[in-house]
Image (spheres, rainbow, N blue to C red):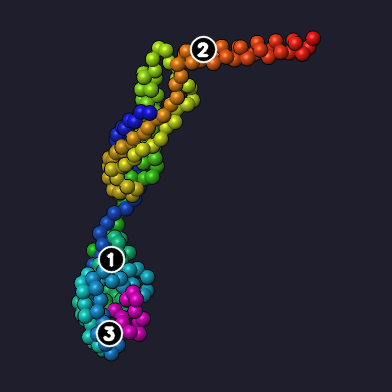
Amino acid sequence: SKVKSISLDGKATGQGFKGTQAQGIVDLRNKTSATISLKSGVKISNIATGLKYVIQQDIDIPANDSAEDIAIKAETFGDNYNVVDQDVTFKIDGYDSNDLIGFAFRDITGGTKVEATVVSQEDLDTLKKSADEELRKQLQADVASLISADEILLTGSEKFTETSYTASAEVNKEVTDFSVNLEVKVDAFKVTKADLENVAQENIKKEETCAESAKVHGT
């Protein structure tokens, strides 16, 4: 067997998006008779749009009281998370709105979304295919160079196996250039010319024996 690796560079051609996350502050109202504690990372949903935001701090909300000016950030980028000149009601994940509810009386802003060049699955597949084709060509040449004058490579016996593959960027990653690294192993069978001649001689003898046997039975 023979193992070889190759690294190829490519250009990203996919179309995607990038941007910034909207941010703002909310007030949370605890309607129960016990303190409610929330950890940073709890998600809240805009009841009108269903869009989610993430609480940015730990909070303890006393019974039948409110916690004000709690920082939130949109779950992901996009100008659709911006809320201007309107009040918003939020549902808190894991809680009934009759127990805990949120309100935003000030603007939630800063969310943006613009087009960007990203790595597509086709980009990765195309570059990997090129790497694989080049490796197979090189490996076939390497294997052929290992065959001595007294040996014969059995055509079609080559078996190629991918042993390692990595890419510098994943699908939808915003980059201009990327690369792939591929490693492939080849196994192949060879025989000596002497062995082939011996097999041929054995076959000839068998054919002659069969022919003689047929003559005897024929008479």
Disc 1 from disc 3: Cα separation: 22 Å
Q: Secondary structure at mark 2?
A: helix
Q: Which residues are magenta?
A: 92-102
Viewport quadrant of the N terminus: top left
Instruction: From the image, give the main secondary structure of the stretch colored magenta.
Output: loop
Q: Secondary structure at mark 3?
A: strand
Neighbours of disc 3 within 10 Å: few (<14), some (14-19), many (20+): many
* Amino acid residing under circle 1: Ala
Q: Is residue 24 visible?
A: no
Residue 199 in the image, given as x and y percentages of width and height = 54, 16
Q: Which residue is mark 2?
A: 197
Residue at the image position 42 percent from the left and 12 percent from the top: 150
Residue 30's disc number = 3
* Amino acid residing under circle 3: Asn
Q: Nearer the viewer, residue 105 or 13?
A: 13
Residue 5 in the image, given as x and y percentages of width and height = 31, 32
Q: Is residue 187 visible?
A: yes
Q: Quadrant of residue 123?
A: top left
